[in-house]
Amino acid sequence: MTSMFLLVSALAMQAPSAAPAPDAVAEAYYLFLQSRSLEQAGNVTGAVSALRKAAALLPKAAEIQAELAGVFAREGRVAESVTAAEAALALDGKNREAHRTLGLVQAAVSDLPEYTSTADSLRTQAIGHLEQALAVPMSDLQSQLTLAKLYVRTKQPEKAVGVLKAFLAEQPGYPEALLMMGEAAESSSKWEEAVTAWGQISMMGARGQVFRPRYAVALVKLGDYYFGLKRYREAADAFDRALSSDKAAIDAPGVTQKRDRARELAGK
């Protein structure tokens, strides 16, 4: 029903004299749905053909071009996907699906060797498209994770932390997201988020032990942060957790002194 609404909405924006006949709308919508069934059945050629017929019936419906871009993207047909997505945006500059597809495609190809010379530009463009796609609140974990990766790659850790928090709220414990969160939070001195991420990772079996030193260091940083805010009880707790986590990774005597001082101040 959402697809039908989008198609009809696009048509409603056209001048009355340019609006297609109801039969054309109905046929285009049938072809739109048929393309999805054909793609799910593995008949990509048929799906593309159905969408092209629908586009011929409704040449001003951006949603059809956006759907076509998605089909091409899922088949790895980069150039055709980009062309269709750009055609959709030419018809409707705010089309979410077209922005999403362009962003995901550009992000993917930016890591390929043959695109090295344009990688930075592609990542910048991908960020812009994915930001627009995610401007409309909805669950889109693939776009969120991809955008977070792009923020990390382009040295925008604070933005990465924001996106990863939203991602982990829906997908808690996702290892790749936790690793990125730890790195991004450290880079932006967001020690509460860094401690949470490294703490969860450090509990993930043998592999997690590699990150226990970073967890301990982040706890010390968090303790310093709380101390500066005069939140002495929380500072003492963070220092104590650091000492219990990995003494070899930190200046244990120094942290012990800071913990004791925080405890003293917390008691006053």
Image (cartoon, helix red, strand yellow):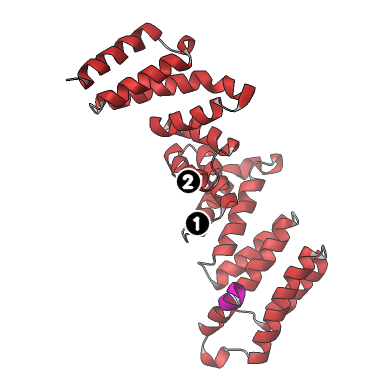
The residue that appears at 63% across and 21% down in the rendered structure is 206
**Location of the C terminus (image quadrant):** top left
Q: What residue does disc 2 label?
A: 163
- Please identify the dominant SS of the magenta region: helix
Q: Quadrant of residue 159?
A: top left
Residue 238: tell me if it is visible. Answer: yes
Could you say which is closer to the camera, residue 172 or residue 75? 172
Residue of label 1: 134
**Residue 239 percent location from the top left of the image:** 36, 18
Question: Vertical placement of 2 versus 191: above or below?
Answer: below
Mark 2: few/some/many CA within 10 Å (<14, 14-19, 20+): many
x then y, percent, for residue 248: 48, 9
Q: CA distance from mark 2 to mark 1?
A: 10 Å
User: Where's residue 40, x and y in %?
Assistant: 77, 64
**Left or right: 141 as drawn, with respect to 53:** left
What span is in magenta?
1-6
Disc 2 residue type (three-letter): Val
Q: Could you say whether the residue bearing mark 2 is in a helix, strand or loop?
A: helix
Q: Is residue 98 left or right of residue 186?
A: right
Q: Is residue 9 left or right of residue 108?
A: left
Q: Residues within 10 Å of mark 1 (few under 14, many from 20)?
A: some
